[in-house]
Image (tube, rainbow, N blue to C red):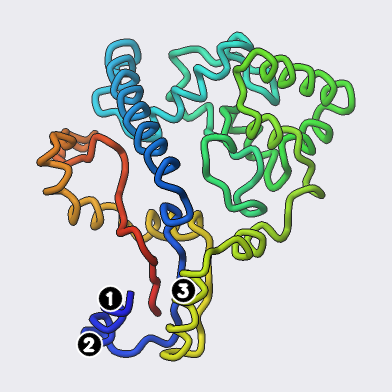
Amino acid sequence: MINVVNASIEAYGKPDEIRIELARELKKSAKEREDATAAISKTTAEHEAYRAILRKEFGLTNVSRNDIIRYKLYKELEFTGYKTLYSGTYISQEKLFSKEFDIEHIIPQSRLFDDSFSNKTLELRSINIEKGNDTAIDFVLKKYNEDGQTAFLVRIGEMYKAGKLSKTKYNKLKMKGEDIPSDFINRDLRDTQYIAKKAKNILEELVKEVVSTTGSVTDRLREDWQLIDVMQELNWDKYDKQGLTEVIQNRDGHRIKRNKTGQNETTIGTMLWMH
């Protein structure tokens, strides 16, 4: 961290503010990291199988990450007869990738910074727009009254009992706006290990403003600033030697390099955003 900061200062000058995040891998034991690696390998294999299905059955030429997420959410609705959870609208294969349906955040990102799969479902775009800043359960009550809410709870309860919904997603579908944890960032920071606190102390000797953030915030910034492409390029040789890369043609006809694992590895250590 010190070497990175010194090199940055030499190249760009002393920063006015630093935001610091402890890489999540450091919070895990060796066994947890091993399990995570195995899970990544399993997910990579599953996604390759999904790509083949989407090319063959849906006619998609270049399958994106969002296409795979949409398909996985579609498969999740198989239990309901491919009907959406809020409005009960049937989604045909022909309309799955149309603009008629959105990937909807169960708890709005503006209220809980969560872009995980467990916070997503498919729904009519018109319903998604109408839902606005409400949680799923609050919207269903507002839109369909108590009878509709009861039917919604029965529907997701049956899915959960059948193993079609994770416990995490089930709980998010039931979460009222008033129950959203307002201190989720502070709670995460209280769990931060000594190394993050020590790093913060060291950096505070350099600049006055040193702010800690959660990993989800950094992930979003990395995506919005298109740093994912930069980091993928930096790690290209490593993944290429392992046979985990490929060159595809995107929907605009451009040839692009892609990491098959879908992972954009960062250095295990401290991520720094310097302003």
**Residue at the spot of label 1:** 4
The circle on residue 80 is none
Which circle marks residue 19 in the picture?
A: 3
Residue that protrudes farthest toward the right in the picture: 146
Say left or right for 224 vs 233: right
Secondary-structure class at tag 3: strand
Mark 1: which amino acid?
A: Val
Query: What's the CA distance linking mark 1 and mark 2?
Result: 10 Å
Q: In the figure, is residue 241 to the left or right of 125?
A: left
Q: CA distance from mark 1 to mark 3?
A: 14 Å
SS for dot 1: helix
Which residue is located at x 25 percent, y 56 percent? 231
Mark 2 is on which residue type? Glu
Check disc 3 and give the amino acid type: Arg
What numbered label is drawn on residue 10? 2
- Give the label, 1 or 2, closer to the camera: 1
227 vs 137, left or right, is left
Disc 2 packing (10 Å; few <14; some 14–19; many ≥20)? few
Which is more toward the observer, 143 or 225?
225
Q: Position of residue 179 (x, y in %)?
A: 79, 47
Q: 74 and 127: which one is in front?
A: 74
Residue 79, x across and y down, in percent: 61, 11
- The residue at 40%/57% (across/down) is 224
